[in-house]
Image (cartoon, rainbow, N blue to C red):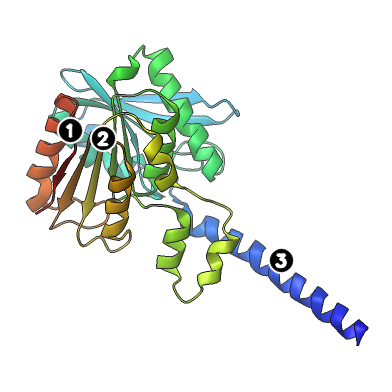
Amino acid sequence: MTGKIVFWFIFLVVIILSLKFYLRYLENRIVFIPDRNLDYLPSEINGKWEDVYFDTNDGHRINGWFCPSETENLVVLFFHGNAGNIGDRIWFLNSLNRIGLSVFIIDYRGYGKSRGKASEEGINTDAIGAYNYLIVERKIPEEKVVIWGTSLGGAPATYLASTRKCKALILFSTFTNASDMASIIMPFAPFVKFFLNVSYNNLEKIPQIGKPVLIIHAKEDRITPFWMGQKLYEAAQEPKTFLSLYHSDHAIISEEDSKILWDTVGEFLKEDKKEESLED
């Protein structure tokens, strides 16, 4: 009897460990979907830009673009989502330029021309490297840096804003944490969240940010539920603003929502705002 108990115990341990390693492998494949090929450049929409490289403190060479506006008053440090690369975001960069904002966008390690392999710790390190580049190399004052994160990019953005000085944090289509996302993606396997190797706990970090926060979320977001944006907003300190988009989707801005989005961003950055919700 004792021998059978030992056998089944060992068998169960092997199964659990195998499941754990498989889920970690699967987790990385789901979270990061990099593309090495840059299909578009800012010059294709007449945007001004500089090709930038910097080294992180753990030795990775990271690529990004600095796209100046005519005024160069504020600089948006932009962190994109989990798929593609910076080349897929040139129209977004152009929109930010049009409202008078310079933009520094980077590719995480493993994306585009950036070296290395992406991980939660790695993209946070890339975020710090990008911030240091702006402050040290380009001499941008801390109070002129606006940190923007879209989708997965909300994680390094929130981390950076909670550990560094900045003017404001803007999150678009951002989730609460990895555990909540796992429950959404795999509701049939609730145990999966206990095996996660990542946390991306934006909900835990956002209360630590003492600067204005703007949360933008589409009502019909088919990947990151609307309630996640609401929870982040509720957890954030004042001053804070919430903008609901009614015709857009996950990390996609519709033509109908474009004006209110860019008007709101422009107004939000003019001065520190009190708590505000732009939801009907």
Observer-nearest of 279 and 253: 279
Marks 1 and 2 in Cβ contact (< 8 Å): yes
Marks 3 and 1 in Cβ contact (< 8 Å): no
Indicate the position of residue 56 as horizontal and vertical percent values: 53, 27
Q: Can residue 157 be seen in this view?
A: no
Q: What element carries label 2?
A: loop
Question: How far apart are the alpha carbons under marks 3 and 2?
Answer: 44 Å
Say which amino acid is labelled 2: Glu
Q: Is residue 23 above or below residue 258?
A: below
Please identify the quarter of the rendering in which residue 218 is found. Answer: bottom left
Q: Earlier in the sequence, mark 1 or mark 2?
A: 2
Indicate the position of residue 12 as horizontal and vertical percent values: 75, 75
Q: Which of marks 3 and 1 is nearer the N terminus?
A: 3
Q: Which of marks 3 and 2 is nearer the N terminus?
A: 3
Which residue is drawn at the image coordinates 30% and 29% (left, top)? 211
Indicate the position of residue 18 as horizontal and vertical percent values: 70, 68
189 sits to left or right of 258? right
To which residue does mark 2 refer?
238
Q: Is residue 260 above or below residue 256?
A: above
37 sits to left or right of 240? right
Identify the disc placed on residue 17.
3
Q: What element carries label 3?
A: helix
Which residue is drawn at the image coordinates 37% and 43% (left, top)? 154
Observer-nearest of 115 and 41: 115
Identify the disc placed on residue 205.
none
